[in-house]
Image: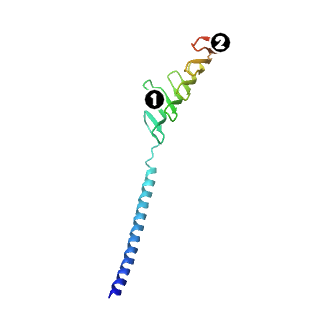
C-alpha cells in the first residue's frame, strides 16, 4: 500500500509540475504579448512636436548639463554646462542678433562672438575683463587691445 501511495503521489507531483510549467509559459507569453502591443501602440503616441518655454538636460546625478530656454526679454539661448554646473558655452539670439559666449572652468567669460549692427569678437582675461576686441561694421574693421583697466593700449586703424 505504501508503494501504491508513493507511485500515485509521484505521478500527481509530475502532473502538477507540468501544469505549473504550462501556466508559467502561458503567463510569459501573455506578458510579452502585452508588452509588444504597448510598444507598437507607443509609436503612435510619440509627439511630432514638443512645445515648451524651456528644456533642461541633466546627467545621471541630476546635475544640469544643458538648457534651451526663452528669457523674459524674448531672447533664446542654448546653454551647455560642465559637471559642476558652470556655464561653458552659451549660444543665443537676442533682439540685437546672435551671440556665442565661451567660459572657462570657473564660469568666467573668455570669448564672445556677436553679430548686431556690426560683427565682433571679444577676448577676455581671467577676471572676465575685455582685453582684445575685433569689430567689423559697414565702414570697416577695427582692432582694440585693452589693459587690465579697460584702457586702450593699441588700436587699428
Q: Is residue 30 above or below residue 120?
A: below
Residue at the image position 65 percent from the left and 12 percent from the top: 155
Q: Position of residue 37 (x, y in %)?
A: 43, 57
Please name which of the two marks, 2 or 1, marks the residue nearer to the observer.
2
Q: Position of residue 128 (x, y in %)?
A: 55, 21
Mark 1 secondary-structure assignment: strand
Q: Crowdedness of circle 2 by 10 Å Cα count: few (<14), some, many (20+)?
A: few
**Extreme left residue here?**
1
According to the picture, the residue beneath numbered tag 1 turns out to be 70
Q: Tell me which numbered mark, 2 or 1, is placed earlier along the sequence.
A: 1
Quadrant where the N terminus is found in the figure: bottom left
Mark 2 secondary-structure assignment: strand
**Extreme bottom residue here?**
1
**Extreme right residue here?**
157
Q: Which mark is residue 155?
A: 2
Q: Position of residue 103 (x, y in %)?
A: 55, 27
Amino acid at each position: 500500500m505504501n508503494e501504491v501511495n508513493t507511485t500515485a503521489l509521484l505521478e500527481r507531483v509530475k502532473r502538477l509540475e507540468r501544469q505549473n510549467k504550462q501556466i508559467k509559459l502561458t503567463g510569459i507569453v501573455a506578458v510579452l504579448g502585452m508588452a509588444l502591443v504597448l510598444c507598437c501602440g507607443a509609436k503612435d503616441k510619440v509627439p511630432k512636436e514638443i512645445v515648451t518655454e524651456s528644456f533642461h538636460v541633466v546627467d545621471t546625478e541630476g546635475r544640469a548639463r544643458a538648457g534651451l530656454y526663452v528669457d523674459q526679454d524674448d531672447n533664446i539661448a542654448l546653454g551647455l554646462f560642465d559637471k559642476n554646473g558652470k556655464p561653458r558655452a552659451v549660444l543665443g539670439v537676442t533682439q540685437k542678433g546672435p551671440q556665442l559666449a565661451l567660459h572657462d572652468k570657473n564660469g568666467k567669460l573668455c570669448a564672445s562672438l556677436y553679430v548686431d549692427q556690426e560683427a565682433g569678437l571679444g577676448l577676455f582675461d581671467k577676471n572676465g575683463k575685455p582685453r582684445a576686441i575685433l569689430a567689423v561694421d559697414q565702414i570697416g574693421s577695427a582692432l582694440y587691445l585693452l589693459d587690465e583697466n579697460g584702457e586702450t593700449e593699441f588700436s587699428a586703424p
